[in-house]
Image (tube, helix red, strand yellow):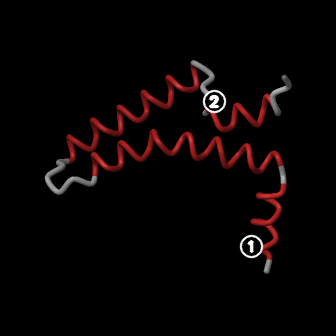
């Protein structure tokens, strides 16, 4: 029951929607690296290289104050023409 309420709140709240859009945008960074690590012939060295790339990409996003497009739309609000 409590989970249902949390999920309802998340989808009925502008802040929750923005958070979901942000997380969805960040997922792309992780997804690409995870796919590379899941190859059957990946060695520990290959995985370490991919993790370093992920760390570098995350740091670069933070330094550039990257906000995914979906979350940015929610921050800016509706367009007025």
Tell me which residue sits at (57%, 19%) in the image.
63
Tell me which residue sits at (74%, 49%) in the image.
17
Tell me which residue sits at (77%, 50%) in the image.
16
The foreground one among 51 and 29 is 29
For disc 1, the marked residue is 3
Residue 34 horizontal/vertical position (percent): 35, 49
The foreground one among 56 and 13 is 13
* Quarter where residue 81 is shown: top right
Look at the numbered disc 2 and give the secondary structure of its residue. loop
Cα separation, mark 1 vs mark 2, equals 28 Å
Q: Is residue 76 left or right of residue 68?
A: right
For disc 2, the marked residue is 67
Tell me which residue sits at (14%, 52%) in the image.
41
Residue ranking furthest to the left: 41
Residue 77 horizontal/vertical position (percent): 82, 32
In this rendering, the answer to whether 14 lies above or below 54 is: below
Residue 33 horizontal/vertical position (percent): 35, 43
């Amino acid at each position: 029951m409590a989970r249902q309420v949390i999920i309802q709140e998340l989808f009925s709240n502008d802040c929750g929607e923005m958070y979901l859009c942000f997380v969805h945008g960040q997922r792309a960074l992780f997804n690409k690296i995870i796919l590379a690590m899941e190859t059957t012939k990946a060695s520990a060295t290959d995985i370490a290289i991919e993790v370093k790339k992920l760390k570098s990409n995350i740091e670069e996003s933070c330094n550039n104050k990257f906000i995914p497009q979906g979350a940015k739309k929610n921050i800016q609000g509706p367009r007025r023409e």
